[in-house]
Amino acid sequence: MSADTVVNAAETTAPREQRSPRKSFEQLVAELMQRDFLGVRVGVLLLILPVFICSIAMQITSRQLWNHPPDSRYYLPMMARDMGHSWPDSIQMNQNISPGWHLSGWYFANNDPTWQMVRTRLLYPVLSIPFVWMWGLSGGSLVVPVLGDILFFWVTARVLQRLYGPGVAAIVVILFTLTQPIFGFSWAGTDTLAMGLAAVIVANLPIERRIGKANLVWLGAASIFIALTRQVGVLAPAMAGAGWLWLLIRERNWRNRWLGALIVTAATTLVIEVVSMMVTTASAASVISHGETTYPGIAREFVHYLKLVTQEAMTYMWHNDRVLLGILVTAGVGMVVRFKSDAAAVFFGAAAATYVITAGIGFSQYMRYEMVMFPAAAVAAGAMVQLLLGEHLPFKARALAGAAESAEAATVVAAAADSGSGDDSESDSGSASASAPISVPSVPKQRFSPAAALGRTAPGRYLGFDQPRPDRWKPQLVLSVAVLAVVLGVSLPGSWGSTPTAPPSPSVAAAQGGSYASTPLAKPGAEVTLKAAFDQASGLTKDSDLLQYAFDWVHTLRYRPTAADQPGWSTRDKDGTTVIHINSLELDRPGQEAFGRALSLNRTVRSDTVKILSRQVSEWGEDVTFTVLDETGAVHQGTATTLYPIWDKKDPGVVTSLVFDN
C-alpha cells in the first residue's frame, strides 16, 4: 500500500461525534421551567396563571348579577352601538341582561355630565366586539376585564424578573393574586384594563436602565389608550416626573435618562386633556374642584377629601384585605429604605397621582380607583422583598457577577490543566491524538425569528426589523396607530354619539318623546308623584331616605333654592331657579339635607294636600300647576313636570321640575 493510499484513507475517515447522554425527565422539566416566554420564566407563569384562571372562572360563574354592575349599563349599550344597533335597541339589550339597574335614553343625553365622562372610554367597548360576537353581550363583555388582569400579572412579573429575579417576581405577583380588587373588579367595566395598561407604562419606564425609541413609542401609545379607558391620565407623567426629579437631585443633570419618558407622557396627557375639554363637558379640573370656584376653596376641598379617602381605604383594607394592606405597606417601607432607587420614585409618583384621582372622585370604593397604582406598588414591594431575601444587588448585576465568576473559574481550570500536562505529554500527543476519539462540539440550532426574516427584506429594513430591539420603533408605531384608527373608526359613528338633550320640562322633551322615549308601564297622576317627592324631600332632611325614588339619579331637575347652602345656589338663572343632577349629591350629606329643606318648605309641607290646578297630559308625563299646604295652613303654589314610571309599574313616577312661585 502506498503512502498516498494511507493518506486518502485517513482523509475519508470522519471523526465521530460523541453523543451527549440522554437527559432525565426531571432535567427536561427543569430546563423548561428555566425558559423565558415573553420575558417571564415559564415556572413563574405556571405558578400564577392556572390558579388565577380557575379562580376567576369560579368567580364569574358564581357572581351572577354583579358580573354586570351599575356602571356596565353604560358600557354594554356602547358595545351594542359599536356593533350597529340603535340606542333604543342597545338599551333594551342591556335591560335584558341587567333589569335591576335603571336605564333610559336620557342616560346618554347630550346634557348629562356622567355620559360626557363615560363616552370618552372608547377602548373597552371596541376591544370587546370580537368576544361579543362569539359569546354574546353578557359573556363577551367579561373577556377583556379578565385579559386586563392577565396583562397586569404578565407585565408586572416581567418587570420584577428583570429587576430582582424570578423568585421575587413569583412572590410579589402571587401575593397580588390573593387580593380582593383583582377578582372583585374583573366585571364588565374598565378597572382591570386600566390596571393592565398602567403595568405597560411601568414596564417601559427607564427603571434602573436606559430605554430606546421603542419604549418611548409604547409609553405614548399606552398613555393614549389608558386615557381612552379611564380618566387617569395624570398617572403616567406623575411616575415619569418623579423618576426625572429623583435623578435630577442625585446626578444634578436635568437631561437625564428619564427626560424622554417625561416629555412623551406629559405631552400625550396634555393633548388628550385638551381634546377632551374640546369635545366633552367633562375634564379632570372640573372633577378635582368639587364645585369650588376659588383656589383656597379648591385647596380646602382637596385636603378634606385626601383625609376622607385615606381613612376609607385604610379601614377597608384593615377589615377586608390585609394582604393588599401588607403589599402597600411593604412598598412604602421599600420606598423609604431604598429611597435612592428608581422604584421608589415610580411608586411615589403613582401614589401621588392616585391620591389626586381618588380625592377628585371624593371617595375610595374598595380600592377600586387605587388599582392603577398596583404595578408601581409591585415594583417598590419587590425591592423590599429582595432585601428581605438578602439579595442587595439588582438581578442583572448579580447575573453579570455570576457570569464573571464562572469565566474566572474556567480560566483557572484551564491554566491548571496546561501546567499539569508537562513536556512528556507533548511527545505522546501525536499517538494519543491518533488513537483517541475526536469530540466535535454540537452547534446549537438557530431558532426561526420572524423579525430577523423580515429584516432581510426591503420593507422590513424600512420598518427597522434589522435594528436591535430597543431601536425598533416603527413597527410599534404602526401597530399603535392602526389600533387607534380602528377604535376611532368604530366608535365615532357608533357609541360616541349621544341621544337628544333631556331638559327638565316639558314632559315630552324631558322623556325624549319620540324614538328615544321608553314606553310607560303605568300612568299615575301628577299628584301621586308630587306626594312621593315631598315625602322623599322630608326624609332627606332627617337622613332617613334615599336620593333616587321620585327623583331620577341622572335626569336633570329644576327647582328654586331658597338659601345659600342649597345645591345650585351659585348657578341660579335670572328667574331664581337652577338645574341640578341628583347624583351630584351622593357624597354631600349637608347638600342632601339642604335640598330636602328647599322642597319640603323647611320640613313643613303636608304632602297629602297636593291639589292640581291645571294639567297638560302627554304620552309620557304631565305638566301641572299645583298647590300644597304647609303645617300652618298657608297655601304654596308652583309648577311641576312629572314622568310616568318606565321601570316598575308600582313606582310613583319621576319629578323632573318642581318650582315654587316666588
Image: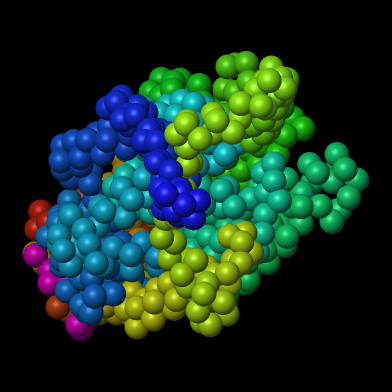
Residue depicted at 61% across the width and 43% down the height: 350
Is 484 placed above or below 419 here? below
Q: Which of 10 and 537 is in front in this view?
A: 10
Residue 237: image quadrant is: bottom right
Q: Where is residue 219 in the image (x, y as percent from the top left)?
A: 59, 59
**How many marks overall?**
0
| Magenta highlight: main SS | loop
In the image, farthest residue toward the right:
252
Is residue 49 among the parts visible in the rendering? yes
Is 456 rendered above or below residue 366? Answer: below
Q: Quadrant of residue 221?
A: bottom right
Residue at x 34% of width, y 42% of height: 185
Is residue 113 positioned above or below 178 on the image? Answer: below
Q: In this figure, which colouring scheme has been used for the structure?
A: rainbow
Q: State the image coordinates of residue 275 (x, y, percent, origin top left).
A: 58, 74
- Residue 302, horizontal then vertical, whole percent: 64, 44
Q: Residue 256: image x %, image y %? A: 81, 52
Q: Which residue is drawn at 32% across and 37% down?
A: 49
Q: Residue at x 57, y 80 (%)?
A: 462
Q: What stretch is highlighted in magenta?
A: 513-521
